[in-house]
Image: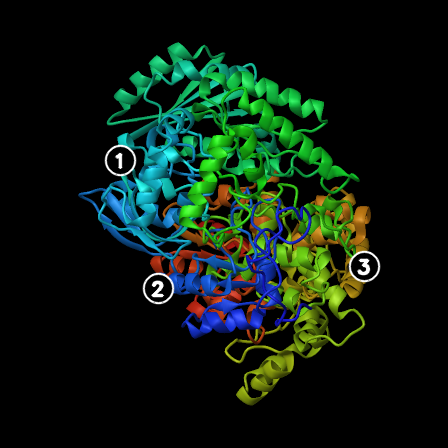
Amino acid sequence: MTDSSASVTTRASADPAQAGGTPSGAAAGASRADLVAALRRRGISDVDDSPLVRALYSTDASLYRILPEVVVRPRATEEILAIHDVARETGVPITMRGAGTSVAGNAVGPGIVVDTVKHLNRVLAIDPERETARIEPGVVHARLQAAAAPHGLRYGPDPSTHTRCTVGGMIGNNACGSRALGYGRAADNVVAMRSVLGTGEIVGGLTGGAEPYGAAGTALAELTDAHLAHVRTTFGRFGRQVSGYSLEHLLPENGRHLDRFLSGTEGTLGLILEAEVRLVREPAVRTMIVLSYPDMAQAADAVPALLAHPLVACEGLDARIVDIVRASGKPVPDLPRGGGWLFAEVAGASVAETQAIAARIVADAGALEHRVVLDTGEAAALWRIREDGAGLAARSLKTPAYSGWEDAAVPPEHLGAWLRDFDALLREFGLDGVPYGHFGDGCVHVRIDFPLVSEAGAQRTFRAFMEASAQALTTYGGSLSGEHGDGRARSELLSTMYDETSVRLFEAVKAICDPDDLLNPGVLVRPDPFDAHLRADRPRHEPPIKLRFLHDDGSMANAVHRCTGVGKCVAGPGPGVMCPSYAATRDEKDATRGRARVLQEALDGSLVQGLADPAVHDALDLCLACKGCARDCPTGIDMATYKSEALHQTYRGRRRPRSHYVLGRLPMWARLTAPVAGVANASLKAKPIASLARRTAGIDQRRSIPAFASRTLRKEARRASVAATASTGTPDVWIWADSFTDHFQTGSGLAAIRYLEACGLTVRVIDEKACCGLTWITTGQLDAAERIVGRAVATLTPYVASGVPVVGIEPSCLAALRTDARELLGEAADVVAGGMLTLAELITRLDLPLPDLTGVEVVAQPHCHHASVLGWAADEALLKRAGASVVKVGGCCGLAGNFGVEQGHYEVSVAVAETQLLPAVRSHPDAVVLADGMSCKIQLDDLADVRALHLAELFAEKLLEQRGGRA
C-alpha cells in the first residue's frame, strides 16, 4: 500500500510532454504528511489522504484517472481560502470537484482535490422579488429547484444529471441542459459571483455590479481592448461555443462581466466561493411536440425552420437510443412512426396559447408524423428517454462505449450536414456510437466504442479519430465542447479549433489569473495530451473468481468497469432503491460509484492491493447487498454480486467475522433449532440469555431476535387440512417453503394457501428441503453456497418443469434463485430461475379473484430484491385493480438481511429507514402497511412498532372476510 509519507505532486518541475506518466503540474516535492499537516494547521478538519479516499476521487465520469494526494471537504468558504493559501505555499495544485460527473476529466487532478458537495451545499437565500438565489458552490441542482419552487421560480439550465450535479460545477463547465433555448447557459444565469483567483486575489461580490473590478479585472479588460476585433469576430459566435475561454463576456458592449467570463473556465482561473444566480418564473403550461422523421439527420435538417418559433427546448434522438431504453426494461411511451425524432417544448400562460404555438411549429416542421403531448406525466416519461440515454448508451454496443468526443456543437443550420459527416467518420475508423442531443442548439452527445482495452495500440485509433473529428468540425465553425467543457479530453485540440492568436490569448488570461499554474493544471492552457492518464488503458488483474459474471464475459474486472461515473447513485432518495447507504451517509465511499472506483483500483491499480485490501472492505462495509444498483444503475452495476465475490476471495480458507458463522448460516441454525423451537423462544425471552446470544452472533444489542416458528410451514402443511396434502394427484399450485417462510414467517405461507384455496385451487407445499443459499451468498461463503443452491435447484427443477406453477413467498429467496443461482451454477439453474413465480405473478397469470380494497390505503415497502430483481409492477397493479390507494415507498427498509442486525451497522440501518420508510408510515397512520420481506417486517416492528402484512396476508384476510369465512 502506498506510504502516507510519499512525496506530493507540485507544480515546480512539471513536464507536459510526459504523455503517459506524471500529470502536468506534478513532480517530487514535500511529503504528503507535510501537506496534510499544513492543511490541518489552517483549521481544516475534513482532510483525507487514505488510499480509500484517494481511490474514490481518482476519476470522475470521464476516461481519466489521476490519483490525488489528498482530498479536502471544506466546511466554510473561509476554508477554501485556507486551502488556496496552503497550495500557494507548497506549490501543490488544486482541482475543484462538484458532483464528480464530469465527462471531460475536468474534476480529476494531482495534488489537492476539493469536494464541496459534502458541506458547502446550502441555498443561502432566495430573493423572490429580484428572482435570484444566493448559493454555495456544492448545492445540488435539484435542491436549488426545490428551494425556488415555493416561490414559483426555477433555475433555468437543467442538465440530465440534475438530480446530483452541483450548480458550482455547472458554472465551472458552463453547463446548459435541454432547455438552454429558453433559459441559456449557466454563464447567462450568473448575476454575481465571489471567487478567489490563482493569484490569491478575491474578485467579484454579491452586489451584481458588471464593471471590471480588481487588478485582474483591469488587466483582462486591457487584454481584450488590445484585441477587440479578434475577440468580436472569434468568440460568442453561437450559443454552444463553450470551448476555451469565453472572452466575449469581457467586451465593453457586453458589460465586461468578469463573473460570467469566469464561468466555464473549469476551475483553471479561480475557485468559486459563493454565487448569485438568476431564477425564472415557472411557466403555467408546458407543451411537448413530438416530430418524427425518416432518420436523425433529416430531423436535424428541420431544426433551423423551427427556431423561428419560441422554443424552450428542442431535443433530437434516433431509433437506436429509443430501442436501448426500451430494452433496458424502462417504459417508453408510443412515438410517431419514424427513425428520428425531435422533442420540442413550448411554454405559455394557457393551454390554448401553447397549442396555438404547437400548431405553427407542426406546420413548419415537415415531419412524417407528430403528436402534441399535453399530459405532464407522459411528457416526463418522454424526457426520461433522453435522461437515461447517456448511461445506457455506454453499454448498448457490442463493446463498451466511452466519453471523450462527447458534446461537440455546430451552428444549428449546419447540424444535419455535420451529423452525416460525423457518421462517415465513425465508419471510416470502424467505430460506432449512438448520437442524440440538444438539436436546437446544434449540440450532439455521443459515446463511442473506442477500442481502449481490447486492441494493441488502441490509443492510436483514439488519437487519430479525435484529431480527424476536430479538424472536420472546424469546417462548420463548430465547438469541441457545447456543454461539458474541454477538460483533459479536448484541451489539447483547442489549437485545432482556434487560431494561434486565440491560443495566445488563452495563455495570457491564464498568466493574469493563475500565473503559477496552481488551478486544475493540464486543462485548457498548456494541456496534457488527451490520450494520457486513460484509466481504460491500464492492465487489469483477473483474480480466479467463483461467480460466473455472466453479463461480463466471466470477468470481474469488466464488471466493475461497467461504472462510467454518471452518478445516478448519488442522486439521493428517490422512487428506486439505489443506493440506500449513500442516501443515509452522503459519503462518496457509500455510493455505488465510489465502491466501483475502489474495486477498479483493486483490480487495476497500485494504490489498493487486491480485493483483500482494507480499503475494499471499508468501501463495501455499508453495502446492504440490496441489488438496487443492478436495476437502477444505467450501466447495470451489481454491487451485491461484487461484494459476495470480494468476501469470498478475502476469507476463503481464513477465519471469518463471527456474524458470518451465525447470521450467514442462519437457515442451517434454524433447521437445527426447529425441533426445540418452543424452548429456544422461551430462553431468548430471558434478557441475559438474549444478550449473550446477540454477543455470540455479532448482533447489535438494540436489535430484537426473531422468534422461531413453533411448527415449520412444511410441518404445518402436513398436519393442517388447509394444505390438503392428504389428497393425491397433481395440485394446481406448488408453494416452495423457503427457509425464512418455513422457519420464521409461516403466517405468510399459510395465508397464501388460504387465499389460493379460496380461489378454488388445490395447493400443496413442497415437502422437500430446498434452501436458496442467500445468507451464504451475501456473506461470501460461495463454496458452501454452490452446494446448497445446487441441491435446491436439483430439488425444484422437476416441480417447475412439470408445468405446475411454483410460487415463492419470501422475495429475497426467490430473487436469489432468479439471479445468484445462475451466477453459481450457470445453465443448470435456468429452469428454476426462469420458471418460479411471485404470488402477484401467479394471480395475474391465472386472473384470480381479488378482494375489494376500495377505501383501503396501503403503504407498501417493496422488499429491495423484489423491486430490483423480481419487479413489483404486478403487485402494484393488483392492489390498484382491487381498489386500494397505494403509497409505494422507495429505497430500502435498512435491515437488509443480516446487515442491519450486525454490530456496527445499527445507526446506518436506522438512518436508511428514516430516509423514506419511517416517514411514510408516520404520515399515514391509518394505512395498512404492506411488506413481503422478512427483513422489512422486522425493521418495522423494531423501529415503528408496526405489524406489516405480506400481500398474501392482506388478500387472504380481506377476501375471506368479505366472503364470510375465517380471516
Query: Disc 3 marks which residue?
Result: 791
- Could you tell me the amino acid type at mark 3? Arg
Q: Which residue is drawn at 77% across and 39% down?
A: 457
Query: Disc 2 marks which residue?
Result: 78
- Could you tell me the amino acid type at mark 2? Glu
- Could you tell me the amino acid type at mark 1? Gly
Q: Mark 3–mark 2 contact, CB under 8 Å?
A: no
Q: Indicate the secondary structure of the residue bearing disc 1.
A: loop
Mark 3 or mark 2: which comes first in sequence? Answer: 2
Most foreground residue, 470 or 955: 470
Q: In the rendered view, tell whether residue 352 sits above or below residue 776.
A: above
Query: Disc 1 marks which residue?
Result: 255
Q: In which quarter of the image is residue 398?
A: top right
Could you tell me how far apart the alpha carbons at marks 1 and 2 are, in whole angstroms?
Answer: 29 Å
Mark 3 vs mark 2, foreground winner is 2
Q: Indicate the secondary structure of the residue bearing disc 2.
A: helix
Where does the image place residue 158, in percent across and percent down from the top left? 40, 38
Mark 1 or mark 2: which comes first in sequence? Answer: 2
Q: In the rendered view, tell whether residue 710 sits above or below residue 682.
A: above
Graded by Cα atoms within 10 Å as few (under 14), some (14 to 19) or many (20 or more), the crowding at tag 2 reads: few
Q: Mark 1–mark 2 contact, CB under 8 Å?
A: no
Where does the image place residue 239, in percent across and percent down from the top left? 40, 28
**Does 825 sit left or right of 341 as displayed?**
right
